[in-house]
Image: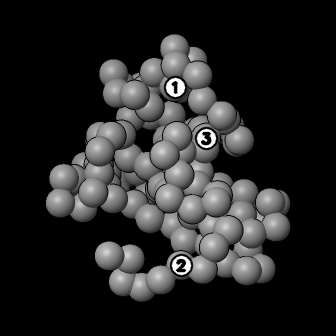
Amino acid sequence: MGDTLFGKIIRREIPADIVYEDDDVLAFRDINPQAPVHVLFIPKRAIATLDDAQPSDAALLGTLLLAAAAYARNEGLAKDGYRTVINCNDHGGQTVFHLHVHLLAGRQMHWPPG
């Protein structure tokens, strides 16, 4: 699970506002939200960055995105829309080196994000 902040959340060593969990994925509210709804979807098996993912991780990557989409539908966010983001490495804005998908919703998103 890794020794990152997210590994500690998976192991319940650090509290988090968990909104979804299955055998492979854990999702929780971001502690520094960038939108009214900001949830992080993480694999329970540690992968540091998207760049570290292997072809054998394809199903897990799909599971992360499908979990985010299901959450958006279940929470009534899909109709108005939402954004999913994966940051990769320092220049991509990644601050925790455990792969994660941001789900942002509840306001109009703009492109480019800035």
Q: Three-letter amino acid code at disc 3? A: Phe
**Is disc 2 placed on a helix, strand or loop?**
loop
**Is disc 1 placed on a helix, strand or loop?**
helix
- Compared with residue 14, is residue 107 higher up or lower down, i.e. above or below? below
Determine contact: label 2, label 3, CB under 8 Å: no
- Compared with residue 96, is residue 108 higher up or lower down, i.e. above or below? below
- The C terminus, quarter of image: bottom left
Q: Nearer the viewer, mark 1 or mark 2?
A: 2
Q: Nearer the viewer, mark 2 or mark 3?
A: 2
- Compared with residue 7, is residue 70 higher up or lower down, i.e. above or below? below
Residue at 21% in and 53% down: 89
Whole-number angstrom distance, CA of label 1 to CA of label 2: 28 Å
Q: Three-letter amino acid code at disc 1? A: Ile
Q: Which mark is residue 28?
A: 3
How many marks the image carries: the answer is 3
Q: Which mark is residue 9?
A: 1
Whole-number angstrom distance, CA of label 2 to CA of label 3: 21 Å
**Which residue carries the number 2 mark?**
109
Residue at 24% in and 61% down: 92
Instruction: Please say which color scheme the image uses.
Output: one colour
Q: Which mark is residue 68?
A: none
Label 1: how many Cα within 10 Å (few below 14, some 14–19, many 20+):
some
For the residue pair 7 and 60, the one nearer the viewer reads as 7
Residue at 33% in and 59% down: 87
